[in-house]
Image (cartoon, coloured by chain):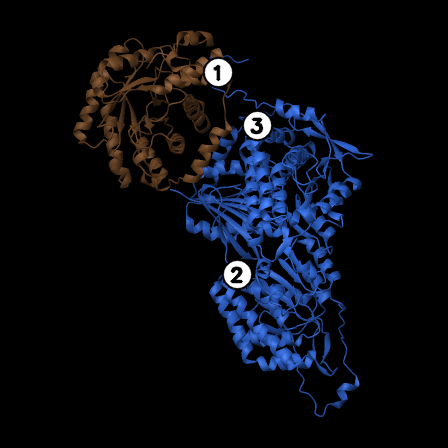
Chain colours: A brown, B blue
Amino acid sequence: MRTTSVEKPKSIHSPEEPRRNHGIPLELGCLKQVQVNKSAAERRAATLIARRTVKKQWQAAWLLKGVSCIDLTTLAGDDTPGRVRRLCAKARHPVRADLLEAMGVADLGITVGAVCVYPSMVSHAVQALEGSGIPVASVAAAFPAGLSSMKSRLEEIHFALQEGAAEIDIVITREHVLTGNWQALYDEVAAFRNACGDAHLKTILATGELSTLRNVQKASFVSMMAGADFIKTSTGKEAENATLPVSLTMVRAIREYREQTGYAVGFKPAGGLRTAKDAMTWLILMKEELGREWMEPELFRFGASSLLTDIERQLEHHVTGRYSAQHHHPLP
Amino acid sequence: MSSVRQIFETMEYGPAPEQTDLALNWLEEHGYAMQPFIYGEFARFMDESYFESINPRDGKPLARLVQCGQTEVNAAVAAANAAFPAWSALSGHERARYLYAIARQIQKHSRLFAVLESLDNGKPIRESRDIDIPLVARHFYHHAGWAQLRSETYIGYEPIGVCGQIIPWNFPLLMLAWKVAPALAAGNTLVLKPAEFTSLTALLFAEVLQQISLPPGVVNIVTGDGQTGELIVRHKDVRKIAFTGSTEVGRIIRRETAGTGKKLSLELGGKSPFIVFEDADLDAAVEGVVDAIWFNQGQVCCAGSRLLLQEGIAEKVIEKLRRRMETLRLGDPLDKGIDIGAIVAPVQLQRIQQLVEQGKAEGATCWQPTWALPEEGFFYPPTLFTGVEPASTLAQIEIFGPVLVTMTFRTPGESVELANNTPYGLAASVWTENLNLALDIAPKLKAGVVWINSTNLFDAASGFGGYRESGFGREGGNEGMYEYLVPSWEGFLPVYEKSEVALRPYPLTNSANANRIEPLIDRSPKLYIGGKQTRSDSGYSFTLEDAEGHYISETGLGNRKDVRNAVQAAGKAESWARATAHLRAQILYYLGENLSVRAAEFSRRLSSLTGATQNETQFEVQKTIQRLFYYAAWADKYDGHVHQTPFRNVTLAMPEPWGIVGVVCPAEQPLLALVSLVAPLIATGNRVVAVPSWKFPLLATDFYQILDTSDVPAGVINLVTGHPDELAKVLAQHDDVDALWYVGSAKISGSVERESAGNLKSTWVNHGKRRNWFDDHQAQGWEYLRHAVQIKNIWVPYGE
């Protein structure tokens, strides 16, 4: 269960009633109609960012929104409880108080969207975030490759939940996509969804390993049909991370699924998002393709860590008019 | 003013103004007044009259410009004339250096150009910054290359002289580049007139020319309205007119230049189809529509303004489109986050409003997004019409505004039928994920440019230009260079001394006939239409005599109905265009073979009619056979190009036959000239209605026996004997004739050009100059093949 109680700006969905995607039966007919033209997607992605730009206080507000949508993440082999605690401290206070003050938003209680860690780090994060209302997300199900037995993948989800994770980021079996075995993909994601109970399920498609945008869109649809609350681009471990054309392809699937079923599914680009400009770009994508509703942490997250520091620097620039140094901001 | 706190809630974009101070300072430095650019100087004249250039965003004046009259135009043409000898004598490399320098300068001052363009024209800064100006620079770079390569690429060609260039207001600097770059690369000098609404970037461009020390007079720029344009068109020292603008003005220019020998290229209006099949990526197609009709406020000659939707997906696409239209942002063109800027001028805005009202009155359903327009300035919202029928005004008339009409179709065949149901033929977009379908549809569309799963793509390496009443000639690419070159020997051709046609539609009664010993078996050569020998509709014949004045025969005096019937027959032979090139070659070879069997007979006939010696006429027959073989050889080799456009796609430049081509043959070399003109046309897939030599039509009527025995399909070659002047006029006035070649007098050349303005058919006339049909340089070659086709550029982006 999401225990969010932090004061958040009034958003379109009240946090008390988190939206869930209850899924629908697998519709193979719908997959057959999937058409994604790569060149056109690339063109839209390229012109999208040229068509929109956000400046001055608008930029500051958008960047703050970006902060609130970050799943502040550490997923490294050398993670330790200490490292996770440091990350959680940053999650509570993602932007320097003086900057928030100067922008007149100190009382909004802006935090990141969640902290995302490996299962064995969940308990440390939960502890460090106690009382903050910030949910802990755990990767699970044999992240990042997913190539383990179904039994152990489900057990891992249960473990993460027991440790206190409120959100579960799982990876799909790429083989099912590459071989067009949509039933297997559907069954897999549905099983994970079932295992998650009240916890939100984010389904990582590992798009960098799905080869084509058509595959990306088909995998998006199957995941959503199987009940994914979020679809997420990448683990951060593939050679290719979140790209704009891939993201465009996924959010268009979200839009179509919403139109067909009424369920609003969230989107999480992850991997390679490092700059404030990236944050603006993806927020523009959400606004243009999905609308205002999808610019809140309930339906949009960045999987990132260093992104936050760059946003903070840009915010300082907005406040002071001076370009900021990285060491002026506390490490995440 | 919104606070960060409020915006955090609303997540609105907010303003993002582009700085305009540097561009405005530039205007201020010039005292908000600009002079025409003549012989390398901003020239002043006595008794100048002025007009104002307006910023369409707020209706306020930007600068005062000179309404150039006869004095200014004369000075500009004289300057260009004076500069021509030295400029055209430069080496290609030297001209390349200048073009390269222009490209570099455009890039260095790109933002200044972009801001000035958006101020003057009202287009969004994103477009001028990301599309117009980069394409301008690219055009000059590309043509720096053609300058360098001209002499080795276009052997036997030379520049024309002074070119008059008249450009529109929708892409002011880009259209300048499309005109100026190839003209200079080829070695011409020019006088350019920008549109009166948008002259400022042309004058900034003039300063660039000063800075790079382009020799004075090579480029001259005169400002003013249509009257100034008319003075350029009429100027006797201007050898070529290149015009981009409305079809209406294009027609006027065609008539005005007729018979003057001025070379002409016209890039005119359009009502381009945007076809979406049910297996298209529909979200991509919707973005395509945005780029098609809401690019530059829809003020684009090739705008995809007719959305043709396959029935099964029509509703869904329209729904998606409405949603998308709600998120379009219209407003200050100098805001970096704006999709749709201002309409160029009140007159254009009124035209759009009027046509939209008319559409509503005719019963079509109009839909516009819910958001409001800015209060000042010339703006019009994106507009979607449904319930439009092909007969609706909105489906036929070029609106030149952000107004889209939609229609539905059931089958691929019907989509083509609807797409081609327009007098225009500039561009088309085809959306399907099925390559088989895309490549089946593209060649069937009457359009100079076809974009597969894309729209409004332009590049200097690919030719741009229309079919039908969208004009003729291409801009860009190899095909565009020919518009600024002429064969170097053409100027030295002799003029026909006697070009009077004298047919005798009465029996011949002179004494020479009295010497005959036995009575002739009467022969009656006929017209040859649709593969059949037919009597002339007129019921008249004209009498033929041999070289010694003996009566030989009569032949039918073809009239306008015969031409009509011949064109109809040619229309039915449409499959010839789709026949394989191998088959066309085989038939041409077969013609040669069968002529060769009867060579002696043809040679005798030639001798008896023309009085030429057997040696001479044997040579003519052999030359004719050789020419048939020559075009048989080319039939499957005169193919297209894959242009090197700078992104991931295949740009196919496909030569396509015109369709039905009229050919009026000269009096001399009745066999050789006929074949020299007809063979390249049929080799490339055209069907021909030919008017043979009026003096010796019997060679043609003998020749149809050869056609009969050589498997030439009925209707591919039709022969109408008769008075060439009259038949030329009928052909020129026939709107189903797509192109017309005329060889004869200067006078009739002029009237052919004048009358062709009706459907703006392409004409190729000799202006009274006499070619030597025995000379391979003059009477065969790529020049003929090039005139026998028009280039269609098909852009096929790929990638999975």
Describe the element under mark 1 as helix, strand or loop.
helix
Do residues under tags 1 and 2 come within 8 Å of each other at their CB atoms?
Answer: no
Where is residue A158 shown, x and y percent of the image? Answer: 20, 22
Residue at (63, 44) in percent of width and height: B179
The disc, 1 or 2, on the residue closer to the chain's N-terminal end is: 1
Give the amino acid type for the residue marked by disc 1 in the picture: Ile
Local packing at callout 3 (Cα closer than 10 Å; few below 14, some 14-19, many 20+) is: many
Where is residue B200 shown, x and y percent of the image? Answer: 67, 32
Q: Nearer the viewer, residue B707 or B535?
A: B707
Where is residue A178 shown, x and y percent of the image? Answer: 28, 40
Q: Look at the picture and state if B205 lies above or below A123.
A: below
Which chain contains the residue that carries disc 1? B
Q: Relative to B15, is A312 on the left or the right? A: left
Give the amino acid type for the residue marked by disc 2 in the picture: Ala
Give the amino acid type for the residue marked by disc 3 in the picture: Leu
Describe the element under mark 3 as helix, strand or loop.
loop
Where is residue B185 shown, x and y percent of the image? Answer: 60, 46
Describe the element under mark 2 as helix, strand or loop.
helix
Which chain contains the residue that carries disc 2? B
* Residue assigned mark 2: B577
- Residues at marks 1 and 2, CA–CA distance in whole angstroms: 62 Å
Q: Nearer the viewer, residue A52 or B597?
A: B597
Q: On the rendered image, what quadrant is the C terminus of chain B found in?
A: top left
* Residue assigned mark 3: B330
* Residue assigned mark 1: B7
